[in-house]
């Protein structure tokens, strides 16, 4: 009996060690995921004068879709069934979250600096929570309301560069407003995805939504071509496109799915805030951008708001999207 008990205990220890190792790997994968995602902002800003935003968006999602498609070949039957049953919902959700959102952010990066864009995008969990309140009827406590107001005040501080007179003159960078709109679109995507409850595993569903995003971005890309806004695919343009489509696209999406499986949607989604830090660091080294005093003031308000929302929430909710 004693030997039997020892064997059970040893197995339990091994199980706990394996679980701990899986979580550690999950966090490592999540950190790499958000680092690669931050690089997309740097690449998009770097070639913003050479590559139109919708061209970058279209080729990013199309190439990522083509790379990930073979990985889900075992799910082609269930994918086809879902596409036949709910094509409009898939098109709407994928188009909003993986095409319109990205296109807006890429437009914004033509005029706004990457550091500011990275800070604004940190609002996505709060935007998602607010939209979930109105669309899904999910509860918001008093602290969530207070935290949301504080966080949005932080965005206002950044948008007006810390100058109240700029607000009176409506002197706001249009690029930053495009990034805010992109963040709202991604929050809407997260809520619609939650409501849709597509019966498909994460990675196959992501591939389907990427396909929908490519179809959504195509008319905007063709419109750019009709206006003769053609990409200058020189060395810089090709490098940027390759980065946003492969390490910052297909690989990043794959790693995010991996991190969600290892950590759960809530913990994996909360690590989104690492992206803001990575964007600021990369923008400093690669783009020569510097944090200004209004960045610190606005970011401080956003952090306070996020703490109110996440630490004092009435019950646990997920801020991460399914893919």
Image (cartoon, rainbow, N blue to C red):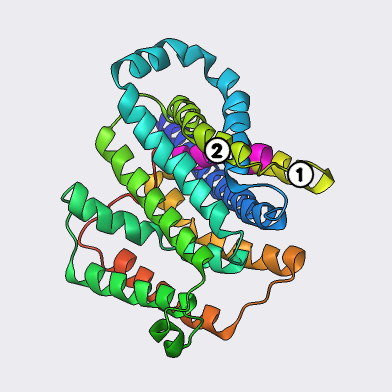
Residue 14 visible to the viewer: no
- Residue drawn at (69%, 72%) of the image: 289
Q: Is 317 placed above or below 148 here?
A: above
Q: Nearer the viewer, mark 2 or mark 1?
A: 2
Q: Quadrant of the C terminus?
A: top left
For residue 121, say whether it is visible.
Answer: yes
Kindly identify which residue carries mark 1. 232
> Dot 2: what SS?
helix
Residue 198 lies left or right of residue 29; in this view the side is left
Q: Position of residue 149 (x, y in %)?
A: 29, 74
Residue nearest the viewer, comparing 226 with 116: 226
Range of the magenta residues?
245-262
Residue furthest out toward the front? 227
Q: Is residue 229 rendered to the left or right of residue 208?
A: right
- Residue topped by disc 2: 223
C-alpha distance separating marks 2 and 1: 17 Å
Image quadrant for the N terminus?
top left
Asked if residue 245 is positioned above or below residue 292 in the image, the reply reads: above
Q: Residue at x 26, y 58 (%)?
A: 130
- Where residue 96 sits: x, y (%)? 40, 41
The stretch drawn in magenta includes residue 257: yes
* Relative vertical location of residue 283 with respect to residue 218 in this rendering, above or below: below
């Amino acid at each position: 009996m004693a030997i039997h008990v020892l064997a059970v205990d040893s197995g339990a220890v091994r199980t706990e060690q394996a679980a701990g190792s899986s979580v550690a790997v999950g966090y490592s994968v999540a950190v790499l995921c958000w680092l690669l995602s931050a690089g997309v902002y740097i690449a998009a800003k770097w070639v913003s004068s050479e590559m139109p935003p919708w061209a970058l968006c279209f080729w990013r999602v199309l190439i990522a879709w083509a790379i990930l498609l073979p990985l889900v070949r075992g799910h082609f039957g269930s994918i086809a069934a879902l596409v036949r049953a709910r094509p409009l919902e898939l098109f709407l959700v994928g188009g909003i979250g993986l095409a319109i959102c990205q296109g807006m952010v890429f437009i914004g990066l033509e005029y706004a600096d990457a550091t500011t864009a990275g800070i604004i995008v940190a609002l996505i969990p709060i935007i998602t929570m607010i939209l979930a309140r109105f669309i899904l009827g999910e509860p918001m406590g008093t602290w969530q309301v207070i935290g949301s107001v504080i966080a949005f005040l932080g965005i206002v501080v950044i948008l007006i560069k810390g100058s109240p007179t700029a607000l009176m003159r409506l002197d706001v960078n249009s690029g930053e407003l495009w990034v805010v709109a992109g963040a709202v679109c991604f929050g809407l995507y997260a809520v619609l995805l939650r409501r849709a409850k597509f019966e498909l595993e994460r990675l196959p569903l992501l591939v389907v939504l990427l396909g929908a995003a490519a179809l959504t971005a195509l008319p905007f890309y063709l419109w750019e071509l009709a206006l003769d806004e053609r990409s200058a695919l020189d060395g810089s343009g090709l490098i940027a496109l390759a980065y946003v489509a492969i390490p910052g696209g297909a690989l990043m999406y794959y790693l995010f799915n991996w991190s969600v499986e290892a950590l759960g949607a809530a913990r994996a989604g909360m690590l989104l805030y690492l992206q803001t830090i990575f964007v600021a660091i990369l923008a400093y080294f690669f783009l020569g951008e510097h944090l200004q005093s209004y960045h610190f003031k606005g970011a401080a308000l956003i952090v306070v708001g996020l703490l109110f929302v996440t630490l004092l929430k009435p019950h646990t909710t997920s801020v991460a999207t399914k893919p």
